[in-house]
Amino acid sequence: MKVKFPNFLKPYYLNKDQLVRVGSVDDGGYVVPLLNIKDSEILISMGISDNWDFEKDFSKISNAKILAYDDTINSEYWINRFKKDLVKFLKLKIFKPRKLYKMFQYLDFVLFFKKNKKNKFFLKRVGNDKNSINIEEINLNEIKDNNQVFLKIDIEGSEYEILDQIVSIKNKIQGIVIEFHEVTSNLDKIKNFLKTIEDDLKLVHIHANNYSLKEFDQFPDAIELTISNIKKLSNKEHGTSESHEYPLEGLDFPNSKRSPEIKIIF
């Protein structure tokens, strides 16, 4: 399946060997310049739900402090989740280790975010209303004078509320992975955001979320972008007129295995 994308979403060229996949093989994984991860001292992860594979992979590459924000995975969530997964497990006719892991996933959550002193989890929504924490507060309370920050943002549409605040700390950012939702009605906002930060940060990878393609040949309603501080990336070929074909073979995979991957053309 091929979909035409506007030229402002065409990534800045980097050699493929500078990129790695971080996180899940399907939904929850992103393609990122390896050096941006290695240079990061703090990862601010906004929106994790029940998947922190990205954060775990990041911690294997970098010694960065990891701070995660999500208001949906409270104690009630975990109790209800355990009950549902237990019922599913008891109905299995064949033992499946993955199902057992899902049932006790809370233990993995505790080990990664609560037993590891370097990592913290905050039961808070990231946004710009009175019930949320915003980038300015995170910058003041957690980032402080740190100038090697990586942002992971998947907050189901609230990303548009914090774009101006991301711009305000752009000189501290090593990299960003962000999933934009409701894309068709917000293309101008995405374009303006990328334009505003382009002197410091470049779009270096794009992937279309095939969960969001409701009709054949429709523009996807969710896209995943990787934005990089490319100043430290040594590559005489980057930024040339060359371009990759997206998705990148061996690095990109469909978010949903039940639907075909979306090939992006410019």
Image (spheres, rainbow, N blue to C red):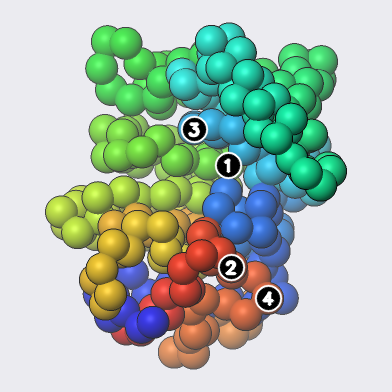
Kind of element beneath mark 4? loop
The Cα atoms of the two marked residues, 3 and 2, are separated by 21 Å
Camera-side residue of 227 and 55: 55
Q: Amino acid at mark 3?
A: Gly
Of circles 3 and 2, the one toward us is: 2
Question: Percent position (x, y) of residue 103?
Answer: 72, 28
Question: Percent position (x, y) of residue 8?
Answer: 28, 71
The Cα atoms of the two marked residues, 4 and 2, are separated by 8 Å
Tell me: 263 left or right of 45.
left
* Contact flag, marks 4 and 1 (Cβ < 8 Å): no
Q: Earlier in the sequence, mark 3 or mark 2?
A: 3
Residue drawn at (48%, 73%) of the image: 261
Disc marking residue 47: 3
Q: Amino acid at mark 4?
A: Gly
Q: Earlier in the sequence, mark 3 or mark 4?
A: 3
Q: In this picture, is 82 found above or below 42?
A: above
- As drawn, the residue found furthest toward the bottom would be 242
Dot 2 corresponds to which residue? 253
Quadrant of the image occupied by residue 223: bottom left
Of circles 1 and 2, the one toward us is: 2
Camera-side residue of 53 and 138: 53
Kind of element beneath mark 1? strand
Of circles 3 and 1, the one toward us is: 3
Q: Earlier in the sequence, mark 3 or mark 1?
A: 3
Q: Amino acid at mark 2?
A: Phe
The Cα atoms of the two marked residues, 4 and 1, are separated by 24 Å
Dot 1 corresponds to which residue? 150
* Contact flag, marks 3 and 1 (Cβ < 8 Å): no
